[in-house]
Image (spheres, grey):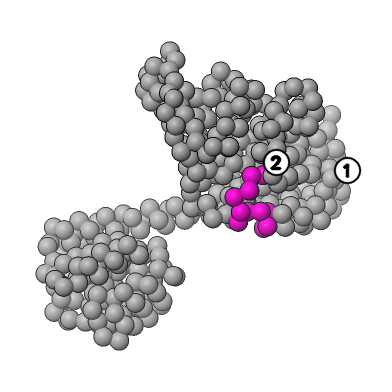
């Protein structure tokens, strides 16, 4: 049931708005406050889906209430109620965060349409926040070893800057977690984070993927298409497995980094982009440079900051914590009870050579949860997770 609060010092207008809303949809739960301070107290004590707020009120006016809500309750849409002389103030209110404004006396159709749009927007914001929290949990870095603490400290220092970062480490070690943490803690966190797996895109298509193309640039280019650099504008571009990128594509990436502009395949028109580039690789790029497979100038552009992610074999002290985390995560995904691992089972897991790193460990834990008993034993590990 949507809860709507009307903050208005004129009782007659409160009654009219309340009557209109209840007649439109009896499911609307409408509350009233006679000034901004009373409205704020009500907002602090319960959740609302929409607030109508008059601009000129005693004690606390509408602009003061809006400012207070923007600090703590910005997900709640606020519709300002403006008199004839308040329109400039209402427009300023929208600039700082109000959803819309309604002039007195309110036009019925406009009012109801605004209500529907505002409630839809609230649902979208709530869903987006829920998804953001789910994504944040997915990319949580688990562990407390010195090596991981060092990485977290590096992220804290580097994330607020626009410095380019090269993340190295073996496959499955969690390089993408570092990239997501850098983005989430940066000033670009509200912008997009676009990921490109350079190893998964054929060399003849990588330029089109990164920079886009215009219609007719090649046989299958039936319409203009924006590339990943454009899509990441204002945010972060994560080039995973950069060591597998072709030399021609490397040259174009270098130009984009140097000039902060790109042009689509088949076009010579420059497009300015504002993108922070993070890159990751499991290869020794210094060796690749010596072998002529990677550009040294691009390496130095990318590796302003180097973060090396150790493999699981180098941080086995984190294994019990990782197992517990994966058990909880997998149980939630499958709607199953959380299983425990006895000490002998954990010791056997710690003795393994984890060449597949964190990714391999998660697969093993999932297999044990599916096939093992309520309490995972050493025998379960031998049967279902033992290395061959």
Q: Residues within 10 Å of mark 2 (few under 14, many from 20)?
A: some
In the image, is 55 to the left or to the right of 74?
left
The residue that appears at 61% across and 36% down in the rendered structure is 239
On the rendered image, what quadrant is the N terminus found in?
A: bottom left
Residue behind mark 1: 351
**89 up-or-down from 236: above or below:** below
In the image, is 100 to the left or to the right of 334?
left
Residue 114 picture location, percent across and down: 22, 58
Query: Which residue is the extreme one toward the bottom?
Result: 59
**5 up-or-down from 150: above or below:** below
Asked if one can make out residue 270 in the rendered structure from this viewpoint, the answer is yes
Residue behind mark 2: 303
**225 up-or-down from 103: above or below:** above
Query: Which residue is the extreme one toward the front?
Result: 259
The image quadrant of residue 90 is bottom left
On the rendered image, what quadrant is the C terminus found in?
A: top right
Given residues 162 and 208, the one toward you in this image is: 162
Q: CA distance from mark 1 to mark 2?
A: 35 Å
Residue 143 picture location, percent across and down: 75, 54
Residue 298 picture location, percent across and down: 67, 33
Asked if one can make out residue 1 in the rendered structure from this viewpoint, the answer is no
Residue 265 picture location, percent across and down: 47, 23
Q: Which residues are magenta?
A: 155-166
- The local secondary structure at tag 2 comes to loop
The image quadrant of residue 241 is top right
The residue that appears at 56% across and 24% down in the rendered structure is 206
In the image, is 106 to the left or to the right of 192?
left
Q: Is residue 62 magenta?
A: no
């Amino acid at each position: 049931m949507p809860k709507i609060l009307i903050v208005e010092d004129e009782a007659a207008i409160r009654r009219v708005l309340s009557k209109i809303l209840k007649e439109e949809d009896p499911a609307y739960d409408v509350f009233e406050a006679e000034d901004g301070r009373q409205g704020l107290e009500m907002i602090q004590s319960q959740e609302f889906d929409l607030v109508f707020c008059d601009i000129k009120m005693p004690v606390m006016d509408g602009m003061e209430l809006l400012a207070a809500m923007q600090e703590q309750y910005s997900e709640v849409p606020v519709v300002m109620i403006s008199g004839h002389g308040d329109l400039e103030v209402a427009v300023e209110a929208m600039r700082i965060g109000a959803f819309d404004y309604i002039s007195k006396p309110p036009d019925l159709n406009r009012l109801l349409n605004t209500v529907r749009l505002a409630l839809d927007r609230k649902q979208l914001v709530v869903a987006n926040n829920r998804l953001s929290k789910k994504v944040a949990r997915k990319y949580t870095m688990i562990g407390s070893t010195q090596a991981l603490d060092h990485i977290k400290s590096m992220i804290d220092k580097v994330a607020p800057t626009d410095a380019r970062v090269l993340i190295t480490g073996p496959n499955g070690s969690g390089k993408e977690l570092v990239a997501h943490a850098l983005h989430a803690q940066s000033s670009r966190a509200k912008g997009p984070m676009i990921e490109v797996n350079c190893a998964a895109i054929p060399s003849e298509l990588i330029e089109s993927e990164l920079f886009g193309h215009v219609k007719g640039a090649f046989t299958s280019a039936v319409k203009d298409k924006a590339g990943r650099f454009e899509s990441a504008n204002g945010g972060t571009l994560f080039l995973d497995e950069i060591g597998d990128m072709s030399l021609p594509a490397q040259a174009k990436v270098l130009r984009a980094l140097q000039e902060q502009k790109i042009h689509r395949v088949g076009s010579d028109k420059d497009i300015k982009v504002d993108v922070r580039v993070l890159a990751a690789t499991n290869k020794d790029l210094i060796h690749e440079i010596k072998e002529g497979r990677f550009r040294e100038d691009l390496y130095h552009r990318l590796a302003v900051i180097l973060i090396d992610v150790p493999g699981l074999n180098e941080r086995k002290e984190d294994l019990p914590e990782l197992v517990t985390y994966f058990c909880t995560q997998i149980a939630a995904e499958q709607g199953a009870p959380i299983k425990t691992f006895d000490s002998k089972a954990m010791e056997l897991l710690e003795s393994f050579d984890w060449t597949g790193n964190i990714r391999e460990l998660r697969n093993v834990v999932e297999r044990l949860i599916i096939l093992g008993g309520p309490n995972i034993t050493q025998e379960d590990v031998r049967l279902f997770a033992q290395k061959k």
